[in-house]
Image (cartoon, rainbow, N blue to C red):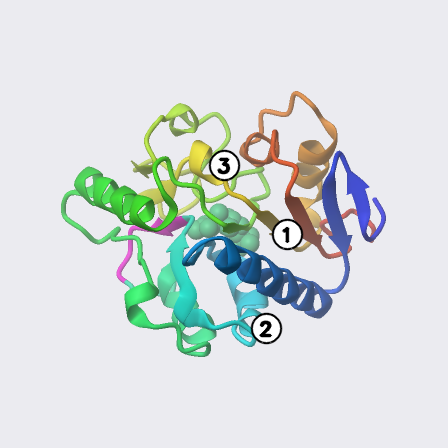
Amino acid sequence: MGSGALTRGWDVRVAAIPELAAILASDFEHEGRGALAAHACFSVALPGGSVATELFPRLSRAAFDWSNVELFWVDERAVLPSDPESNYGRALPLLLRAALVPPERVHRMPTDAADGPLAARRYARELEDAAGTPPRLDYVLLGVGEDGHVASLFPGHPVLDAPATVAVIDDAPKPPPRRMTLTLPVLSGAARIVVAAFGRSKARAISDALTKDDSALPLAKVIRGSARVMFLLDQGAANLS
Ligand code: 6PG
């Protein structure tokens, strides 16, 4: 797998993390300008995990007017926003405050709500208000688990077949078990999908999704059928080291 290689129409970039962060910021600026030229806002969904930690600081400095962004999350753990495990909590200093994203543009997943399914339906409505019905997000950024999960869509989990827009699960194999997630149709239907992965532990899942037509990994299911996918991989995730 070489840097810049095109695999089945997918753009695969292999570089050190600072360079990947710069590529993401530039792609985000480009896609954002395109979305704003086409319609009123730029709808975006973000992950947590190492992608947030490594890429959000540079993304926060993207040359982009964040007042035109509608920011969602691809998933969230059922913890308070103040918990270190919260995807929203991680984004707060690294991106939201750093980029001065207007609070009214920020759509935190309400995993602390008492009624999870109701909260998921409300989040789906917020998403539809910004991205249409069914929602077509302009930009989805995803991390990848070692098992090939993306967002909180885990291999073999029944929620992979859920027709809903937003789902609650209480049996995630990665702690914490209770989470909220955007579903497969929403993620795979995004206008632009960017997948970021760092470290050798991710290489098998990445290779499987990139090369096997019949891969059952959630990552493969999300990108299958979408030509506008970019992979941001360090050497370990690309299996080059
Ligand atoms: C989450 C994430 C999840 C994450 C992957 C990879 O809430 O757990 O959104 O989908 O992106 O598990 O996480 P790392 O990059 O930290 O390994």
Q: Of all residues shown, which one is farthest toward the right?
A: 2
On the image, the x and y values in percent for residue 155 come to: 51, 30
Discs 1, 3 touching: Cβ within 8 Å: no
Q: Nearer the viewer, residue 56 or 41?
A: 41
Instruction: Identify the residue at horizontal 74%, vertical 48% (top origin).
Output: 12
Per the image, the residue denoted by label 1 is 197
Crowding at dot 2, Cα within 10 Å, few <14 / some 14-19 / many 20+, comes out as many
7 is higher (above) or lower (below) than 230: above
On the image, the x and y values in percent for residue 124 come to: 29, 42
State which region is magenta.
Answer: 75-80
Of the residues tagged 3 and 2, which is closer to the observer? Answer: 3
Three-letter amino acid code of the residue under disc 3? Gly
Measure the C-alpha gap from mark 2 to mark 1.
16 Å
On the image, the x and y values in percent for residue 121 come to: 23, 40
Give residue 58's mark. 2
**Label 1 near ligand 1 (CB < 8 Å):** yes
Q: Nearer the viewer, residue 191 or 206?
A: 191
Left or right: 189 in relation to 133 = right
Three-letter amino acid code of the residue under disc 1? Ala
Question: Of label 1 and label 3, which has the lower sequence position?
Answer: 3
Three-letter amino acid code of the residue under disc 2? Arg
Q: Is residue 146 visible?
A: yes
Q: Is residue 85 visible?
A: no
10 is within the stretch colored magenta: no
Q: Nearer the viewer, residue 180 or 43?
A: 43
Measure the C-alpha gap from mark 3 to mark 2.
26 Å
Instruction: Identify the residue at horizontal 40%, vertical 36% (top origin).
Output: 183
Per the image, the residue denoted by label 3 is 189
Dividing the picture into quadrants, the one containing residue 210 is top right
Instruction: Identify the residue at horizontal 35%, vertical 26% (top origin).
Output: 163
On the image, the x and y values in percent for residue 206 come to: 68, 40
Question: Of label 2 and label 1, which has the lower sequence position?
Answer: 2
